[in-house]
Image (cartoon, helix red, strand yellow):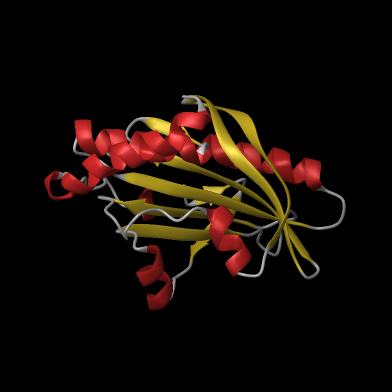
Amino acid sequence: MNRRWMPAALLGVGALFTVGVDTQRTMPLRGSLESALPATLEGFPGTDGVLSEQERAVAGMSAYVVRTYAPLASQSGRPFSVYVGYYDRQTQGRTIHSPKNCLPGAGWEALASRTEQLATPEGTVTVNRYLIRKGTERALVLYWYQGRGRVQANEYRVKWDLLRDAVLRRRTEEALVRVVVPLSGDDEERATQLGARIVGSVVPALARTLPT
């Protein structure tokens, strides 16, 4: 779709979305997110974290998992984290928040951004790729939206698909998926390769758990 027409199209379909909110179906997961994500990734065991009540209230997700994978004392390598926030039904005031809007609020500065095409067992997918910094900390962030049979990075397209499916399919369920790999020194390329492997594991794992 031509981006010049996107705002008008979203406004028009958004009006239909508002009318049809009460007719949307709530779509439960086929299994828990905790079980969906691999217990071990890249040979590292995962440990689940807990978001605060305030964070959960702001995000408004119906289910989530935030898992940190870190090497054991006998292992070498870098830790990384995977976050999945699932919305079984999106409505006005209860929709996915884009990380590109949330990161500055958490004190992170975007150094560079682009999309990245990565191979997965589910086919090639496009994800958003950000380099971010806060003080002396730097990290690579990969994120995408997954649900209703799609893996999508373009947020205009995500919103269009959401509004269209709300009207035509009465379905708005979707997951935001975010991978964070801390950077240490000049190792961006190795972090990128690691991130690509993580995406290749997470995309098919969620495909087996998200509603069909």
In the image, 40 versus 107, the foreground residue is: 107
Q: Does residue 25 sit above or below 52 in this rendering?
A: above
- Residue 165 is situated, as x and y percent measured from the top left of the image, at 27, 34
Question: Is 173 on the left or on the right of 105, as rendered?
Answer: left
Closer-to-camera residue (186/15): 15
Depth order, front residue of 1/151: 1
Is 159 placed left or right of 211 in the picture?
right
Residue at coordinates 54% horizontally, 61% vertically from top-left? Answer: 102
Q: Which of the 4 image quarters holds residue 206?
A: top left
Q: Is residue 183 left or right of 88 when viewed as pictured?
A: right
Q: Is residue 153 above or below residue 43?
A: above
Image quadrant where residue 107 sits:
bottom right
The C terminus sits in image quarter: top left
Furthest toward the bottom, the residue is 53
User: Residue 138's spot in the image, x, y percent?
Assistant: 75, 60
The quadrant where residue 117 appears: top right
- The residue drawn where x is 40% and y is 69% is 58
Pinpoint residue 69: horizontal percent, then vertical percent: 58, 57
Image: 11 above or below 57: above
Q: Is residue 210 visible?
A: no
For the question of whether residue 32 can be seen, the reply is yes
**Looking at the image, which is closer to me, 159 or 14?**
14
Residue furthest toward the left? 23
